Image (cartoon, rainbow, N blue to C red):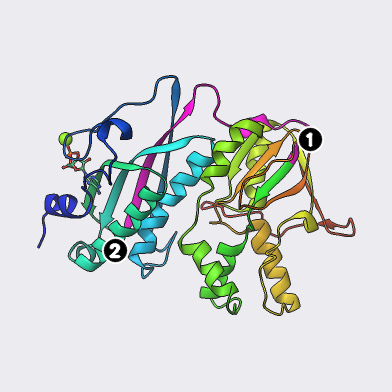
C-alpha cells in the first residue's frame, strides 16, 4: 500500500511540460516543501478562487475519475475567466476513502484528467493536501489580471445589454437524462453529457471581457440565479425575453410539451454549464471566435428580474437556480 507521500510523488508531482521553464511558469518552488513559492508578473493583481466538489452532492460517486480530475480544475478556471484574469497556479486538496487511495487505475485516471485541464489552460499544480476521508476534492486556483482591470459583478449600468455565451442548459439536460427525467438521443446525448462531465471554461472570452464588459459572472448555479448576483451587486434590475435566450439550438430530438418545458427550465435555471454571463454598454457588439454570444435583454433601473416570452407575456420561473442551503 502506497503511503501518502508515495501517492503525492507518483500522481501529483511532475516536471513542467515540454519547453516550459520554472521562470516562465512563475514557479520558484513547487510541490515538496511546506509551501510553494510563485512569482507574479509585475503590475498585476492576483485573483484567487476555491471550489469544493463533494461526492453525492456535486457528482455521482461512480463518475469517471478522468472526468472528475478535469472538472475539479475546470470549474475554478471558469471563476478566474469570469474575472477577466489568466489562471496560473493551483493547489489540490484530496479526501480519499481507503479503497480509492489503493486503486492505482482510479488515481492515475484522475491525475490524467486533472493535468489535461492544467495543460489546456497553462496551469501549474504547486501544492495541495491529501487525507483519508469521504471522497471530495478542493482546488484553489490563483490567476492574474493587470492591476485595476479585473471584471467584477458590480459594474452593470442601467441600459447595459446582457449577454450569454454558448447554449446554457446542456449540462442540466445531461444530468436530467442520467436521472431518467428525459430521454436524450444522439447527437444531443453526447453533447449534453460532455457539457456535464468535461465543461470547457470560456477563458478566451474571459480575457476579452476586459475590453468590453461592465460586469461578468460564470453560470455555475443557473442563468437566472447568477444574473441575480450581478443585479444584487450592481444595484439594478433586468428585463429578459426568452426567445433571445440560447435555448439549445442543437437539440434535435422531437420535443414533447413536457420535454420543451424541461429544456426551458434547464436553460434558465440549470447549473453546471460554466458559460459566461456579462453586461456591456448598449451599443457594444461583443464577439469571440468560435463561440456564439447571445443578447438576452437589458439592465433596468427598476429592481427585480422580469422574464417575458415571445408574445410579451410574463414567465414566472418556478426555480431560479441551485442553492445548497435553500
Ligand atoms: P505539510 O504537512 O507541510 O502541510 P504535506 O505533507 O501535507 O505538507 O505535503 C507535502 C507536499 O506535498 C507539500 O508541498 C504539499 O503542497 C504537497 N501535496 C500534498 N498533497 C498534494 C496533492 N494532492 N497535490 C499536489 N501536491 C500535494
Ligand atoms: Mg509543513
- The mark nearer the N terminus, 1 or 2, is 2
The residue lying furthest to the front in this view is: 19
State the residue in front, 275 or 233. Answer: 275
Q: Is residue 320 above or below residue 278?
A: below
Q: Is residue 122 above or below residue 270?
A: above
Answer left or right for 141 relative to 157: left
Span shown in magenta: 134-161
Residue in view at x 71 percent, y 80 percent: 254
Answer left or right for 191 relative to 138: right
* Picture coordinates of residue 318, whole percent (x, y): 71, 60
Element on which disc 1 rests: loop
The residue lying furthest to the top in this view is: 43
The residue lying furthest to the right in this view is: 311
Q: How many marks?
A: 2
Is residue 153 in the magenta section? yes
Q: Quadrant of residue 245?
A: bottom right
Q: Which residue is mark 1?
A: 282
Q: Which mark is residue 109?
A: 2
Mark 1 Cα-neighbour bin, 10 Å: few <14, some 14–19, many ≥20: some
Residue 32 visible to the viewer: yes
Q: Which mark is residue 69?
A: none
* Picture coordinates of residue 58, whole percent (x, y): 44, 59
Residue in view at x 75 percent, y 48 percent: 295
Is residue 22 in the magenta section? no
Residue in view at x 20 percent, y 63 percent: 98
Q: Is residue 196 above or below residue 204?
A: below
* Picture coordinates of residue 56, whole percent (x, y): 41, 64
Q: Is mark 2 within 8 Å of ligand 1?
A: no
State the residue in front, 112 or 245. Answer: 112
Residue 175 visible to the viewer: no
* Picture coordinates of residue 182, whole percent (x, y): 61, 77
Mark 1 vs mark 2, CA separation in Å: 46 Å
Amino acid at each position: 500500500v502506497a503511503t501518502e507521500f508515495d501517492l503525492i510523488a507518483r500522481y501529483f508531482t511532475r516536471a513542467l511540460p515540454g519547453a516550459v521553464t520554472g521562470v516562465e511558469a512563475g514557479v520558484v518552488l513547487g510541490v515538496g516543501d511546506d509551501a510553494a513559492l510563485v512569482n507574479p508578473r509585475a503590475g498585476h493583481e492576483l485573483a484567487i478562487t476555491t471550489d469544493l466538489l463533494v461526492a453525492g452532492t456535486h457528482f455521482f460517486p461512480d463518475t469517471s475519475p478522468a472526468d472528475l480530475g478535469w472538472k475539479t480544475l475546470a470549474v475554478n478556471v471558469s471563476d478566474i475567466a469570469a474575472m477577466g484574469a489568466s489562471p496560473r497556479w493551483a493547489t489540490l486538496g484530496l479526501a480519499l476513502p481507503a479503497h480509492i487511495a489503493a486503486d492505482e487505475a482510479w488515481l492515475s485516471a484522475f491525475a490524467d484528467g486533472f493535468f489535461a485541464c492544467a495543460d489546456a489552460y497553462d496551469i501549474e499544480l504547486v501544492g495541495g493536501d491529501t487525507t483519508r476521508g469521504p471522497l471530495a476534492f478542493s482546488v484553489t486556483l490563483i490567476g492574474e489580471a493587470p492591476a485595476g482591470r479585473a471584471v467584477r459583478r458590480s459594474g452593470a449600468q442601467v441600459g447595459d445589454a446582457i449577454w450569454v455565451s454558448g447554449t446554457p442548459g446542456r449540462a442540466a439536460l445531461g444530468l436530467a437524462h442520467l436521472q431518467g427525467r428525459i430521454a436524450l438521443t444522439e447527437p444531443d446525448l453526447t453533447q449534453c453529457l460532455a457539457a456535464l462531465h468535461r465543461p470547457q471554461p470560456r477563458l478566451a472570452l474571459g480575457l476579452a471581457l476586459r475590453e468590453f464588459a461592465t460586469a461578468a459572472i460564470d453560470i455555475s448555479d443557473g442563468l437566472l440565479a447568477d444574473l441575480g448576483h450581478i443585479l444584487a451587486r450592481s444595484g439594478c434590475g433586468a428585463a429578459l425575453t426568452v426567445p433571445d435566450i440560447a435555448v439549445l439550438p442543437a437539440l434535435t430530438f422531437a420535443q414533447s410539451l413536457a420535454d420543451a418545458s424541461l429544456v426551458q427550465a434547464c436553460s434558465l435555471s440549470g447549473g453546471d454549464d460554466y458559460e459566461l454571463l456579462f453586461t456591456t454598454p448598449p451599443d457594444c457588439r461583443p464577439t469571440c471566435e468560435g463561440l456564439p454570444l447571445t443578447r438576452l435583454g437589458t439592465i433596468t433601473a427598476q429592481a427585480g428580474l422580469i422574464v417575458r416570452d415571445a408574445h410579451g407575456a410574463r414567465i414566472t420561473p418556478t426555480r431560479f437556480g441551485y442553492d445548497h442551503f435553500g
